[in-house]
Amino acid sequence: MSKKIKLSELGSLFNGMDVEALEGVTIEGDIELEMDASGGLNPQLAYMLGHETAQIAQHLINISRLMGYPVDQLFGSMARAAVPGVARPQELLRSKFEVARMDEWKNPIQEVTLGATSADGGSRGRTITLGGENALPYYFDSPMPHRNYVTMDVFDMPIGMAKAVKVNYEDVIESPAEWAKKVVKDFNADMVTIHLISTDPNIRDTSAKEAAETVADVLQAVDVPIVIGGSGNPDKDPEVLEKAAEVAEGERVLLASASLNLDYERIAKAANQYGHVVLSWTQLEINAQKELNRKLMKQCSVKREDIIMDPTTAALGYGLDYAYTNMERIRLAGLNGDDELSFPMSSGTTNAWGARESWMVKSPLKEDSDWGAREYRGPIWEIVTGLALALAGNDLFMMMHPGSVAVLKEITQSLHGSLERDTVDISNWVTAEV
Amino acid sequence: MKINSPLEVYKYLPQTNCGECGEATCMAFGSHVIDRSLKLEDCTPLLEDKYKKKYLELGELMAPEIREVIIGVGEHAVTVGGDDVLYRHQLTFFDQPAFAIDVWDTMPESELVERVTFIRDFKKFYVGRFLRMDMIAVRSTSGDPGKFRDVVSKVMENTELPLILCSLDPEVLKAGLEVSAERRPLLYAATKDNWQAVADLVLEYDVPTVLFAPDDLDTLKSLASTFMEMGRYDLILDPGTNPQGNMLRESFENFLKLRRAGIKEGQREVAFPLMSVPLTAYLTGGDAVSSSYWETVLATVFTVRYGDIMILHSIEPFALLPEMHIRDTIYTDPRTPVKVEPKVYEVGSPGKDSPVIVTTNFALTYYTVESDLASNGIDCYLLAADTDGLGVEAAVAGGQLTGQNISDEFKKVDFDFNEKTGHNTIILPGLGARLQGDLEDATGMNVLVGPQDSGQIPPWMDKNWPPKPK
Ligand code: B12
Ligand code: SF4
């Protein structure tokens, strides 16, 4: 079989493709390239037609193959074999790389400050500011004004924890104040979250007043900004958070959370009255997030600088695909001008410990390869879950394992550009002895 | 893709509505071409000579912004690149990143074989399939072509996974190619110093190659332009993966810049798959666990942001599992939840005394429940109710799982309780407790509520099965 291709046909093929070899080549009349299936492109023919034509032929074949055209059947062995006469350039074709900055990101994310020092009527040693971004996290389009922060979980009663987590807290599990001190001093927590889970009527039904005392203890024990979390019981939480907001007056805590399935108005009101920030929590649904934020602002008069969002964190392997994309869409919408979504975000990264891979001794499936030691699986599950969300736009991380906190901080601060580390020569990594 | 509406695709199709592609109309076919669920070649008439010009033109218009590069041959071949968008919600990402694990030519042979076998066989079940590693990267640490050739051969004897031949010395690469060219390995790498000799190899052996220009996008682009000039389009770009500090930030930026230039600005010289080398985590001098953790961290960063192929070192399961999962997370198609066929499945070999259990057809839910049952030797009938791929709680909350539709589902698949069972009992998931009354009304069966987590079913069964007669 022999196949004839007219050079004039090449034009339409190359149309729109940046084929440099064609530039400056004028083709007069129709030359037919004869491609013999049996023996590749005749070298003599290539010679006669000149080097450029041979190059064009090669381009044609490559491009056609690239586009899925069955050239290999058409030309038989020809297409596989290297084409003699395709000389490589002697010199590198020098070119410069440039790329534009994003021009559609015009709307900055709201800055929100947590904690208040004595100058502002609080007693915190320092404050933490989130938000203010003009670009996706760590993008070169615009510097990210604040790094990511981590708030570590403290519970007001002993709870079930994965073994790898528990070993770190056994000595403080009975005392929220000691627990809080430990995460700040030993584990470098930027903030502390006190979860008032014992208030749940189905758990201990601790009164709002007692819970408020726990909050006061924690505020006394540490001087970092704090988050106050309810038990998640929609009937009890408003009352618990109101009381907690009262004892924390002036400290600019984050009240977690206002959600659509409870009386968010009461929580918003408590925040307004005692000078706190509201965590606006929805479940993986961008429109619900818009709705709740709008209600907080319009109906409850919460100021923009007093809102942080929690769009829900699902663990790696258990819905992180939804959580990741939900956050990325929310952040992009905010940057592109949606003022109902342009708030800093917080993630309950601790949810990663719900994934079986993070706590099970071994795989429940015999077909699986060995999962290895679980002490190492849990922390990395929490890290990867958090890191993916950091890249999607999340600002604040609620976490549990000290090792996870250390690594997540290291990577987010590296990407943020706030960590000096030695430069490593990577040019010859191939031969490295590792 | 240069066009994005089915109508535009339609213009290039035969417009006969012949149905050969499996779609009722050419227009319907067009919309599948746009969402990339069908290929142009599925329209066989279009491949006929008389449509050749249209086929080629359409092929060019529909080509993904980021070129696809194929490495390897046969069923193990991997395709990388192929993306059309910067964010997965805008369509979906195609061709998940290929993960290669390294071996090196100064390894003792027994260790080498053991490592290759481990990489080849490592697998984790996830929603109906196994997650695995894809390739082996053979590094020349000795610099000796003979040794390299031997190790490449040894690797090939033990696995059919595609190879990356890693050396900056063209003599070494050539030695590797001599024994492996048939398998279409990927060369690593052409640099500003060795590109001529590597180009000769690429032309001679017709293999894909990586272009490596650490921290220097001008040179990277120059290398790409030069290789394109030679008619080579199966290129992969490595802008360098610095493992830490501000240089890591710079590497991250380079990935963003290259991908933005390729997709948003249509700069063809850089619209190639990108390679990241998280293995550089091991150059920082940390202990084995820290390095392995850090490598996983780098792999995560570059899986999320635009790495298409990676070279990794750690074979610790605690590194491999999250790496495979984050890749799946980012590359799963956000347009449709992964679901299983809604029907009654038989787990083990159920008989008349076996329980009938309800769950949903969300793949993650179904396979979690199924594996909990199977691995504990519980024979049963398991209904994967059609919730359109939602898990139990979301489906209950959203109304896709109700007493009535569970009842309908059993009818739809003709599940005859009297014939199959002797107990007239259905077990609901704990998170579906509130459907109990409705389901009893709809079916007239006895409905039990199981525990919240299917992992708790075995102890629950010990207490509650067989059901006590009322
Ligand atoms: C991912 C997710 C989504 C995804 C859905 C993904 C999917 N394909 O299902 C999306 C984003 C689409 C979604 C949407 C919604 N969601 Co949603 N979602 C989640 C999330 C984060 C994870 C759910 C999940 O995948 N779990 C993993 C799977 C494997 O679990 P599972 O199906 O329940 O199976 C387990 C058990 O049920 C049990 N089991 C299963 N079968 C059986 C059978 C028997 C016999 C037994 C004994 C046990 C058993 O074992 C399994 C393994 O542990 C949860 C919160 C959370 N972290 O749990 C919220 C959650 C389920 N969602 C919730 C809500 C409210 C919604 C929405 C209504 C939000 C909205 N306003 O739009 C919508 C509903 C959508 C719809 N139905 O139309 C609520 C439900 C609250 C409630 N209890 O009523 C939750 C709990 C969040 C919350 N805390 O508020 N969601
Ligand atoms: S096979 Fe081609 S011509 Fe026939 S219906 Fe499908 S798209 Fe139209």
Image: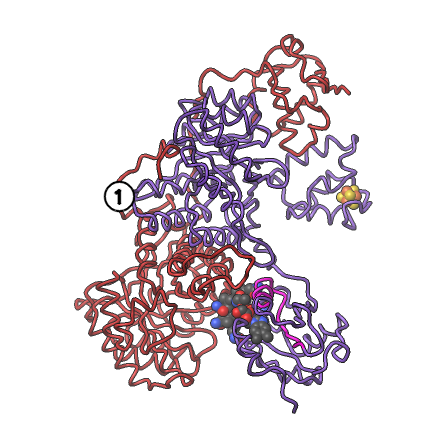
Count of number-bearing discs: 1
Percent across and percent down for residue A370 are 48, 56
Please state, as top left, top right, bottom left or bottom right, where the C terminus of chain B lies in the image. Answer: bottom right
Among the chains, which one is red? A
Q: Nearer the viewer, residue A393 or A182?
A: A182
Three-letter residue code for mark 1: Arg
Q: Is residue B379 visible?
A: yes
Crowd class of label 1 (few under 14; some 14 to 19; many from 20; radius 10 Å): some
In the structure shown, which secondary structural element does the residue marked by tag 1 occupy? loop
Residue holding disc 1: A421
* Vertical arrangement, residue B342 with respect to residue B219, above or below: below
- The quadrant holding residue B280 is top left
The quarter of the picture where residue A122 lies is bottom left
Residue at x-position 41% and y-position 36%: B107
Residue A365 in the image: state x and y as whole percent: 54, 61
Instruction: Name chain B's colour.
Output: purple
Range of the magenta residues? B354-371
Quick check: is B368 in the magenta stretch? yes
Q: Position of residue B265 (x, y in %)?
A: 50, 37
Q: Residue furthest left?
A: A118
- Which residue corresponds to the image point at 35% horizontal and 40% vertical from the top-left? A434
Is B64 located above or below residue B459 in the figure? above
Give ligand 1's quarter of the image. Answer: bottom right
Who is closer to the viewer here, B409 or A26? B409
Give the chain letter at badge 1. Answer: A
